[in-house]
Image (cartoon, rainbow, N blue to C red):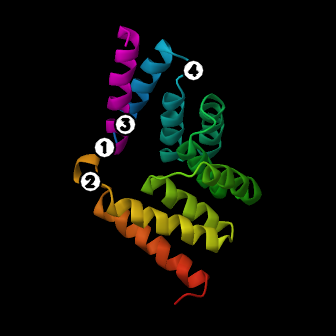
Amino acid sequence: MTSSQQQIATLQRAAHTAVRAGKLRDAHQHCLAILALDQDFADAWFLCGVIAAHNGQVKKCVEIFHKAIALAPDNGEYLAELGKQLIALRETQQALHVARQAYALNPSRAPVLNTLGTVFSHCGEHATALICYGRAVRALKHTTAEAGNPSASWQADLYFNLGASLQFAGRF
């Protein structure tokens, strides 16, 4: 690994940590430093999109997510987050198209599956949403503490989403 690659990896970890801690300015600075080293580093673009979304700049985050996806078209997380933001813009058909692309990549991480479930649910695709939520719950059960279990609040949201989709599907 070159020194530039090591620097990017360090900055990327710091950016992810800052986003999780809600330190969006710090995360943005780390992303800008990454992009100064490598303008085509998809994850830095993606994190900039996440930051824009947190700041309520939905149209801007969609533009940024498109850039990240152009650089890493097979990243289900990027596609799922784009779908979620398209729902916020009420672009349901485009959100459904993007969610189907992400779903076809067979994601296995609980957060990605939860996001996809939410997009499918908002698009009226409750059967597919239930599959996503079910897979997310199973993935969560296999996540070790060392791998960083999502917070209790996040897990509660997942189970709420699952319950709501069960209701929409008539499975009381």
Residue 144 disc label: 2
Is 122 left, or right, of 166 in this rendering? right
Report crowding for label 1: few under 14, some 14 to 19, many 20 or more residues within 10 A (C-alpha): few
Q: Is residue 39 above or below residue 50?
A: above
Which secondary structure lies at badge 3?
helix
Can residue 20 be found in the magenta stretch?
yes
Q: Amino acid at mark 4?
A: Asp
Report which residue position mark 4 lands on. 40
Label 1, label 4: how many angstroms apart (C-alpha)?
A: 25 Å
Which secondary structure lies at badge 2?
loop
Q: Residue furthest left?
A: 146
Q: Is residue 2 above or below residue 56?
A: above
**Percent position of residue 25, x then y:** 39, 32
Quarter of the image with the N terminus in it? top left
Q: Mark 4 or mark 3, which is nearer the start of the sequence?
A: 3
Q: Name the residue at 40% across, 65% down.
A: 138
Report which residue position mark 3 lands on. 16
**Percent position of residue 126, x then y:** 63, 73
Label 2, label 4: how many angstroms apart (C-alpha)?
A: 32 Å
Query: What's drawn in magenta, residue-wise?
Result: 1-21
Label 3, label 2: how many angstroms apart (C-alpha)?
A: 19 Å
How many discs appear?
4
Label 3, label 1: how many angstroms apart (C-alpha)?
A: 9 Å
Q: Mark 2 or mark 3, which is nearer the start of the sequence?
A: 3
Report which residue position mark 1 lands on. 21
